[in-house]
Image: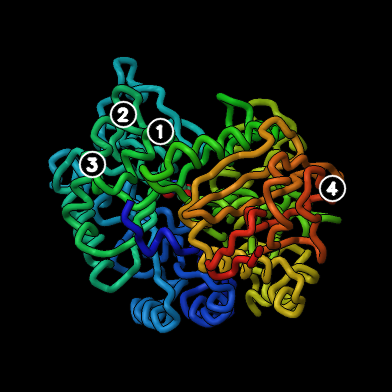
Amino acid sequence: MKKKWWHESVVYQIYPRSFADSNNDGIGDLPGIISKLDYLQTLGIDVIWLSPVYKSPNDDNGYDISDYQDIMDEFGTMADMDRLLAEAKKRNIKIVMDLVVNHTSDEHNWFIEARKGKENEYRDYYVWRDPAADGGAPNDLGSTFSGPAWQYDEASGQYFLHIFSKRQPDLNWENPKVREEVWNLINFWLEKGIGGFRMDVIDLIGKIPDEKITGNGPKLHEYLQEMNQKSFGNYDVLTVGETWGATPEIAKLYSNPERNELSMVFQFEHISLDEQPGKAKWDLRPLQLTELKTVFNKWQTELDGQGWNSLFWNNHDLPRIVSRWGNDKEYRVESAKMLATLLHGMQGTPYIYQGEEIGMTNVRFATIEEYDDIETRNMYNERIEQGYTNEEIMNSIYAKGRDNARTPMQWSNAAHGGFTEGTPWLTVNPNYTEINVDQALADPTSIFYHYQKLIHLRKENPTIIYGTFKMLDFANESVFAYVREYEGDTILVVCNFTGEATTFNFEAASEYGNGDILLANYTTAPTLAYNMELRPYEAVMYRLSADHGVTQSKKGNIETI
Ligand code: NOJ
């Protein structure tokens, strides 16, 4: 596969509403982001994925867009956006925008027009259907945000489709005019010099609602090839598809360069493993490490050389990983570093979600009223009606609610974590007094500097970027260990995934010398041996050097003569 800059990049996701508030209205904004670019440069990232900043009535915090070529009032102006692009460029940081074109806001002009009646020229921009014979919805498709996916329109006596909230009507991708509009808006942003697009729920655009097919519809890849041809195919940009239903086979369709679709997928198989199969994301079960290994192993080996994947634990829809699969109390620092090491040692483009680099945790608000997220609130009401107790539902929200990721960024121990001097739109996690950027920057052993080192190691070591992947000790339920190999260089990653001390048997230890410790999350690291004693959440990355008197000349390698 031809090497591309985005194979070698690390992406940082910003959820602008919660990142930094420059005008103290309680809502993060573009000037706020600009003021933190130096911080991001210190971390070492190459790309910012900006969650939507377009005009929006904020039914789903910007994922409901009313004008794709304008900026949300609370976030600033187009001049601020241009300044962000220019300032980021000075620091060699590219800006990837969020492309949300499965649906628009109901306040988008196209929908305002479409709603005017069956004859309107925009009517066919959306998915309208007559009622079923009994006068009800055309079928029983459900919305991701609870309730039916069809909304009745009194005026015309028809239903329109909304896979998300009823204020997010689905666009009709079968209409060539809709596709044309989308290519135009993509080109508008590309001409401004952005670094690419993250494509929201892109696997839904080929849907056939009448057959209740939503994800991976038959025309999905045809549309993506057309998009590539008509827009970004002429630019050297990163395109990443949010692809919930992807398997490695499907991921190759999206991301094999020969097919001219997207740069990479962003798929969720690993991150759904603590959910009861076939049930909602709120229905939990414990994670089994060997299942996590199976999933990572499958993606690492099956996509190698044939496609490209994203590496992530977090985004604005997911709970904080240190609370989810680490320990956000006595081992917060160790477990956050372990999880980072495990992920960043693999093949793919790593994504860091704001606050992950300082080990921000989930939040527990006492009542549902303190939550903002539409998905959380709708689920709460639906489950109360279904007879769940308040406590049961709140426990699901504490574990999985999207507001876990959306509490404002914790910059300092000043009021509201230094995010704003006003009243934040969502309460800051009260642990900001201890967990904040100032603290992290002042402590050379902080999670922040561990991420900084991981980013640096990736840049210095093609093995981490391009190497093959081999899982070790598959059946071990405590230790996640693997080897990466590239052009004679070998890197070993060993991670204790648990809060208990444990032993790892490194079967091939005798073939190697002491190894070169590239990174560790305690001040000392275990010696490379057959029996390696690991402390709780201990993680180490070694460069292995064959103990055969070979001198390796690659930068960073130890000399073993
Ligand atoms: C996926 C986005 O990540 C999520 O935040 C949003 O609610 C839905 N798509 C709808 O746009």
**Mark sitting on residue 209:** 2
Pointer 1: what residue? 149
Circle 1 sits in a helix, a strand or a loop, which is it? Answer: loop
Q: Counting residues from the N terminus, which is met first, the one under dot 2 or under dot 1?
A: 1
Q: Are marks 2 and 1 in contact (CB under 8 Å)?
A: yes
Mark 3 C-beta to ligand 1 under 8 Å: no
How packed mark 1 is, by other alpha carbons closer than 10 Å (few <14, some 14-19, many 20 or more), is many
Which colour assignment does the render follow? rainbow
Mark 1 C-beta to ligand 1 under 8 Å: no
Circle 2 sits in a helix, a strand or a loop, which is it? Answer: helix
**Mark sitting on residue 109:** none
State how far apart marks 4 and 1 are (Cα): 53 Å
* Residue 51 or residue 512, whichever sits in front: 512
State how far apart marks 2 and 1 are (Cα): 10 Å
State how far apart marks 4 and 3 are (Cα): 56 Å
State how far apart marks 1 and 3 are (Cα): 17 Å
Amino acid, disc 1: Ala
Q: Counting residues from the N terminus, which is met first, the one under dot 1 or under dot 3?
A: 1
State how far apart marks 3 and 2 are (Cα): 12 Å
Extreme-top residue of the structure = 133
Amino acid, disc 3: Trp
